[in-house]
Image (cartoon, rainbow, N blue to C red):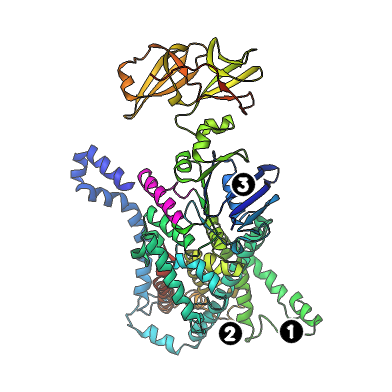
Amino acid sequence: MSGIVIEGVQKSFGMTSVLRGVSLTVAHDEFLSLVGPSGCGKTTLLRIIAGLEAVSAGTVQIAGREVTALRAADRDVAMVFQNYALYPHLTVRQNIGVPLVMRRLSAVERIPVVGRLLPGVATKRCQISADVVTAAEMLGIGALLERKPAQLSGGQRQRVALGRAIVRHPHAFLMDEPLSNLDAALRVTTRAEIVALHRRVGASTVYVTHDQSEAMTMSDRVAVMMDGQILQVGTPEAIYTNPQDLRVASFIGSPSINTFAAEIGPDGEVMIGSVSSGLGSTGTGPAILAIRPENIAPAETGIAARVDHLEYLGESLLVHARLLEGDELVICRLPPEARQQLRRGEMIRLRPDPAKALLFDGAGRRRPAQVRIRDVVHG
Amino acid sequence: MADVALSGSALNQPRLARRMGGDAGIAWLLALPAILAYLAMILLPLLAVLALAFTDYEFGARSFHWIGLANFADMLSDRTFAASIRNTVIYCLFVAPLSIGIALGLAVLIEAGSRGKALYRAVFFLPVVSLTVAMATAWQYLLHPSIGPVNALLRMVGAGTPNWLGSSDWVIVSLGFIGVWENVGFNLVLFLAGLTAIPRELYAASEIDGARSGWSKFWLVTWPMLGPTMLFVIIITMTRSIRVFDTVQTLTQGGPNNASEVLLRTIYQEGFHYFKFGYSAAITLVFLVIVLGLMLIQTRLIDRRVHYG
């Protein structure tokens, strides 16, 4: 059974184009994160999958069924909203039960008091109640069933929102930054709980976030979105170590990836100023060499820089250095012991590990490159 | 905020605070203007009315006597008073549900529409800002039994042409329609404000949860979320319609034959026409008890169910 298939989806609001041809496939029981800066269109894409927004062009399929023209209620998806969107007048029990009540009972059967007298309604209500309790127990909120949302903490409300999503066993879960309203400590623990919940429930999950650490830690695959397009979809490792676009490389990773203006010489040697990077490529002309902070370190020879600032993080040391040529800032992540050897204002030479360096062309597209000179960088 | 500022200044000026009797003294001092205004403007007149209600005081009289509950006993046998109570109740039961229901329906429609919100709001709010007394002239013409357009229209379709303001069967209904016309715009604006305050995400959530029709979304989201607004609108509309006076005074003067006599007009007649201040005060007291009683019932019954915060 397939999960979610999105093909060529475009969306514009008036003259503004928000999504410009997005295609994406989410396997059944896969956890996929949509990550990108605010305004990149990730929430719009999620709302299109949910059926809360109509597409301007393109198609959406869920579980092998074309749903582009179907409304949200008929798509068999559940959504967790950023502000949880709980019904404030209903208890936790009723909130979680709403999706079941709306689907299992007819409009007449839902009428208060009178509806309960109709044949079969009592049995249905009983079954709904049992399902609600099961979902609540799974989330550890079984003791809160009679409370109203206003009497709950942020974390508890978030669980109720999750409960309302899982109670119906939908084909797809859509989550719109569900952790952004929690405090930092709770966010980290809830991250793991959502992943565990996803494994238990096992349905396609699309998780929208602007927080790259959430995307990297929780997902089977990550889709990086920018300016209404998906730049790259891949496993967290692939996105981190093998970005196909400079914008992806810059967005993922903290501290951010270092970039150097480079030049491909006539012999295919990639030069940073007058220093060889140890990398070779085809073609000539300007290029951009990008290197993660952990893959560049001081060495005997390399790019001349001055130590600007040291950040001791316990498990590592971040060295902020300024290039003598061009005054650009470079950050290296070194083992914490390096603190003894480095002083602020000191002159150092930095050498990127050519095996880990990434080469991009002027437009930010990845260029093939291979190591020319084997060089021992890490001592 | 006020507490913080207060204790802060008290810390800075311990001597002043001590002379004033500490924080509490300063608090009373600061509240004094409001307390005085409340005493002079609301509490004392109210007490005066309360006292007058148990006297036979007439305007211009040199003396008065305490007559206990005699004024209230008179009310029981006063046919004008009985008619005014009955008419006021009918008027309220007519105006409040209709003007609230129509306003709610219109507000939901206007809110759901994509254009012309400001225009509709302005059109329906117009009766509220226009002077009732001036508008009464227009109604007088519209409802005129022989030259009025309403009856002209009814004649065209071959229906009966009642004397809207002149027949005792129709007069309270006619005044009720004018009351609805007056109140719908006011309630509409309140409902529109209430609707705007409902988070859009709740509608999105209800859609995902399977609320397909506008009808089920209304009952799942709109109706409960409008609860606080609804309580306010009910109280306001009830008090506004109990206080009906200007349309009655300008259009019918309580006639024909007391058929449109209402509570406020009776108070006015007794006090300022017959100068029976004591009796007028007694009716005012009854009026106040009714209004307060209504509010108490409404807040006790409904308030508990509409505030979720």
SS under mark 1: loop
The x and y percentages for residue B97 are 56, 75
Does residue A197 appear in the picture of this structure? yes
- Kindly report the distance in space between the C-alpha atoms of the residues bearing marks 1 and 2: 19 Å
Residue B259 is marked as: 2
Q: Which residues are magenta?
A: A177-199
Q: Are marks 1 and 2 in contact (CB under 8 Å)?
A: no
Of labels 1 and 2, the one closer to you: 1
- Kindly report the distance in space between the C-alpha atoms of the residues bearing marks 1 and 3: 70 Å
Give the amino acid type for the residue marked by disc 3 in the picture.
Answer: Leu
Q: Which residue is mark 1?
A: B161
Query: On screen, A345 above or below B206?
Result: above
- Mark 2, residues whose alpha carbon is within 10 Å: few (<14), some, or many (≥20)? many
Give the amino acid type for the residue marked by disc 2 in the picture.
Answer: Ala
- Given the image, what chain letter belongs to the residue carrying mark 2? B
Residue B124: quarter of image: bottom right
Asked if the magenta segment contains residue A189, the reply would be yes
In this orientation, which residue lies closer to the viewer: A46 or A285?
Answer: A285
Residue B180 is marked as: none
